Amino acid sequence: MSHTLSERQFPIEIFATLLIFSQSHLFRHIDLISSTIAGSQFVGVLSDPRTSSLGRYVRRLDFAGSQMNIEDDLLILQSLTFLTEIRLHKGRSEHFHAIRNYLGGQLQKLWVSGAYSQRSVQFQELQSMLASLTVLKFLSIGLSSIWAQGLGLEIYSPMLRTLLVDFHLTFVAEPGPKLWKWLRPETMVVIDVGTGYIPLWARDFGISQVLDAFISGFQQSQVTVRCSQFPALAYLFALFVCSLPDAVREISIEFNVEVSDVPTDCDSHLEDWDDWDRALIKRYEAGSLNRVWFICTSRMISWDRPSTSSDGTPGSDYSTLVCVRKLLPQSYKAGIIEVDHSSRFLKTENAFNHP
């Protein structure tokens, strides 16, 4: 029996060879948020001369500033010299300072989630960090940071291709021209409104004014809105279309395809859909709208991590995509409605070059 087992064992040299060739894949993405590897363990790997070289394979790092020791965080950021993507939750001023010093000229994607006061040290370091990101191509910033990010837009990299911001009515308290002022014409802007739910009691409390303030100064010719398939969104979109500056000629609506989001109901809130339809037609007849794209996508872009493809798998819901022509009949008849059945993930650039 022992002879048979030994015959089935691979020589240790083969395992060593496999490990060598797989290192760049095994360590490409380090996730310290979901505890796939503990932060202290990873610090041990980077601190050990025998294994510290593994840090050169890491391209993406996910971590939360509230979960780890700050000294460990700084050691990690200093050691990952080839890092190109960071997803940071509740970052501290020390994190922003380290990113600026060690990664300013190479970071291409940054996801930031957390709350910052405009007068806090965190906010000042956030601005300084953004100024250092000379090759940044993608920026996602959480809803509670939206105005801090807006004040710092003038220092963004000229290479920024995609800006993803969360939007919630309760978080908008100031006008937002600086949020959009320094964007390049070709930069793709994605606004995530979630369910966009507005309670009935809140509909008479200046929602249009809030939207006007949020979108004020927006000069991009295209905008993408991410949302659920919650039927009440039609009410928000009718107001949103009316608030858009004349410069916006193309709108892409990206519905969440996953049924775990909210139940889809294409037979409710029909009056809101009618209002949205009329708003689109009014904009079209005024010469300020060329087309509206409708797409159902998996949550490819989220704070947690890319979702797996929902194409053809149980749990996918394309109901709204199927019904949109019926729900917006005037716009469809006018030829401004385009329904994309082929895309499955939200594109982060060139979003309007649909097939």
Image (spheres, rainbow, N blue to C red):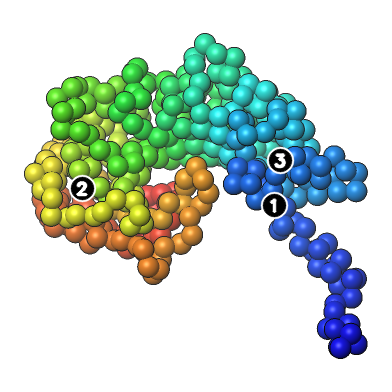
Marks 3, 2: nearer the viewer? 3
Residue sitting at x 30%, y 36%: 248
Q: Position of residue 341 (x, y in %)?
A: 32, 63
User: Would residue 12 be visible to someone looking at this image?
Assistant: yes
- Would you name the residue on which mark 1 appears? 28
Residue sitting at x 37%, y 68%: 314
Q: Earlier in the sequence, mark 3 or mark 2?
A: 3
SS at mark 3? helix
Instruction: Give the class, few, some or many, for how many residues have Cα within 10 Å of label 1's Cα (few <14, many ≥20).
Output: some
Identify the amino acid type marked 3: Gly
Q: Earlier in the sequence, mark 3 or mark 1?
A: 1
Query: Relative to the observer, which residue lies in front, 197 or 233?
Result: 197
Q: Position of residue 229 (x, y in %)?
A: 27, 50
Confirm or deny contact between disc 3 and disc 1 (CB under 8 A): no
- Would you name the residue on which mark 3 appears? 39
Q: Position of residue 97 (x, y in %)?
A: 68, 23
Identify the amino acid type marked 1: Arg
Residue sitting at x 37%, y 39%: 192
Location of the C terminus by quadrant is bottom left
C-alpha separation, residue under disc 3 versus residue under disc 1: 16 Å
Is 175 positioned to the left or the right of 48 in the image? left
Quarter location, residue 111: top right
- Would you name the residue on which mark 2 appears? 231
Residue 317, above or below 216: below
Quarter location, residue 104: top right
SS at mark 1? loop
Quarter location, residue 155: top right
